[in-house]
Amino acid sequence: MLARLKLDRIYDGFLFLAEAARNPPILKSHHHVELELNLVVRGSITYVVDGKRLTFTGRTLLWMFPSQEHQLVDRSDDAQYFVAVFTPRLISQACKGRGYQGLKRRTPADAGVLHTTLDPETFDLVRRTMEALMRDSLDPDILNRESGYGGDSEFRYQHGDPDGLNAGLRHLLLMSWRSQTSGPSPAGAVSLHRVVRRALELMSEGESDEGLARLAERCGVSEAYLSRVFRRQVGVPLSRYRNSLRLSRFWEAYRHPEQKTLTEAVFEAGFGSYAQFYRVFAQAYGEGPRACLRMPLKPVTPRG
């Protein structure tokens, strides 16, 4: 699925710190025309890319290229990771030398997710650069709620100093690429069983709402086998993943331009009851949905 990141032309990209405790899960497999960079600060994040599961932990720098379908399938409860995207325009203007031509690719040179583990000193430098670029940005709660680029139809990414942000993103891109090309690329990809790949595909299409028995039948295996192999390979129980997927669909339905009520969005997302939704929501965000949904959208004040 091609995701559109709602970036106004004044911006050459964006940056925000995703935190599992307040960032809605976006579990659909997707790609976008922008190059994406993640830096894991704390905890772990797990992606499925090209039928393989990859888990990344602290100090890992990883790249998602424009044609690379990727799906976030799990995060530790304490996960914090920076998400930066760079437009094709920025890459074209910034990457003139031979050493940076790899950034212009639509897919990585090698299969899988290009990544490296930074040494502590380099990690601290990249992290502090990212933190400095966020000082004139939107409130972290808003950026996490809108996943950086905005599920809400009225949301647009904003920064108080667009020129400073663009210059900083250019520096961040080149610095991170130098770190990537000079650092180690640890292994760790797990090839997913065809049954697990089929289950992920069906659940992404909405089959998670039909119950475990139906899902297992569609995959051609028993419920017990599906649950066992899914947990072993993806790293989380199937029930937890299905609830995270429903939570992701809730946000999508609730932010729809038709302005669905909270209850309508809950049942459209596939929850069997409001009580079930409340329990899953509170476990994910540490508070009930009504308190979390009160946060208003506030624009930033431009410099000058």
Image: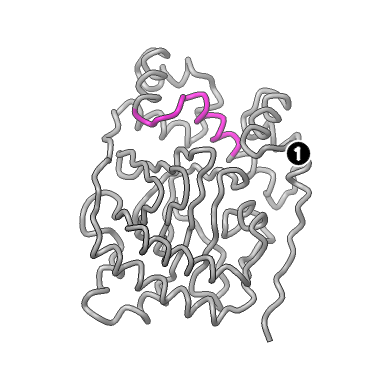
* x, y percent for residue 297: 73, 60
Tell whether position 150 is magenta: no
* x, y percent for residue 143: 62, 58
At 41% from the left and 49% from the top, the residue drawn is: 58
128 with respect to 53 (left or right): right
At 32% from the left and 58% from the top, the residue drawn is: 119
* x, y percent for residue 124: 42, 62
Q: Which image quadrant for residue 122? A: bottom left
At 56% from the left and 44% from the top, the residue drawn is: 20
Tell whether position 238 is magenta: yes
* x, y percent for residue 37: 41, 60
Instruction: State the residue in front, 261 or 118.
Output: 118
**The residue under label 1 is which amino acid type?**
Leu
Q: Which residues are magenta?
A: 233-247
Extreme residue in the bottom direction: 304
255 with respect to 52 (left or right): right
Q: Could you tell me what secondary structure mostly forms the magenta stretch?
A: helix
